Amino acid sequence: MRRTLVLGGARSGKSAHAEGLLRADAPATYVATARRDPDDAEWSARIAVHVARRPAEWRTVESDVVAVLRAAAAGDPPILVDDLATWLTAVLDDTRAWDGPVEAARQKCARLVDAVGSCRAELVLVSAEVGLGVVPSTRSGRLFRDELGALNAALADRCTDVVLLVAGIPLRLKPGR
C-alpha cells in the first residue's frame, strides 16, 4: 500500500503538494489535526484557507487520527492527514509533557506509527521538518523538535515515499515502488 510522507518547513508548500498527490475529482478523507480556537481570528483564517482549498469530493474529519487509520479498509478512498506537527502539539498538551514526563506522549506517537504501518488505504501524511534550524533555547522548543524529529523518522521508515518541500520545490528523499 502506498504511504507518502510530505515534509517541509513553514510556508514551504507541503500541504498544497500533499493535496495535489490525490485526485480532486475523486473521494478522499482529509483528517484535519488543527484544533479550532474561537478566540484566535488569525488561526481561524488559516484554517479557512485550507478548508476552501479542498475539493468538494473530499470528506473532512476532525477526530482521532489513529482511529481513522485503523478503521480504514482496503479499497477505501485515500486518506490525507494534515499535519502531524499540530497533532503532536496537541498530544504534548494533552499528556502535559511540556513540563513533565514525555512517556505518555511517546506511547501515543508509537500508536500512530503502528497505525500508519497497518493502514490499508492509500495514505498521505504532512509534517513539519524541524531538523534544519538552530537548537531551541527553551526546554519546550527542544522537546518539540526532538519528539517531532523522532516521529518523522519513524514515519519515514513506514512510508513508501518521502518528499521534502523546499521553497515549493519537492525533493524526493525516498522514491516509491
Image: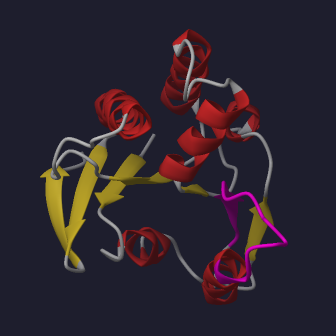
Image coordinates of residue 70 in percent, x first then y, are: 70, 30
Snapshot quadrant of residue 36: bottom right
In this rendering, is residue 152 above or below 60?
Answer: above
Q: Is residue 6 left or right of residue 85?
A: left
Q: Is residue 106 left or right of residue 58?
A: left
In this rendering, is residue 43 above or below 101?
Answer: below
Q: Is residue 55 left or right of residue 164?
A: right
Image coordinates of residue 41 in percent, x first then y, are: 73, 82
Residue displayed at 52% across by 32% down: 116
In this rendering, is residue 177 above or below 156?
Answer: below
Image coordinates of residue 10 in percent, x first then y, are: 35, 69
Residue displayed at 71% across by 38% down: 73
Residue displayed at 45% across by 71% down: 15
Q: Which residues are magenta?
A: 27-42
Image coordinates of residue 80 in percent, x first then y, are: 57, 58
Q: Nearer the viewer, residue 175 or 152?
A: 152
In this rendering, is residue 125 above or below 16?
Answer: above
Residue 64 seen in the current view: yes
Residue displayed at 55% across by 24% down: 99
Judge whether residue 127 is colored magenta: no
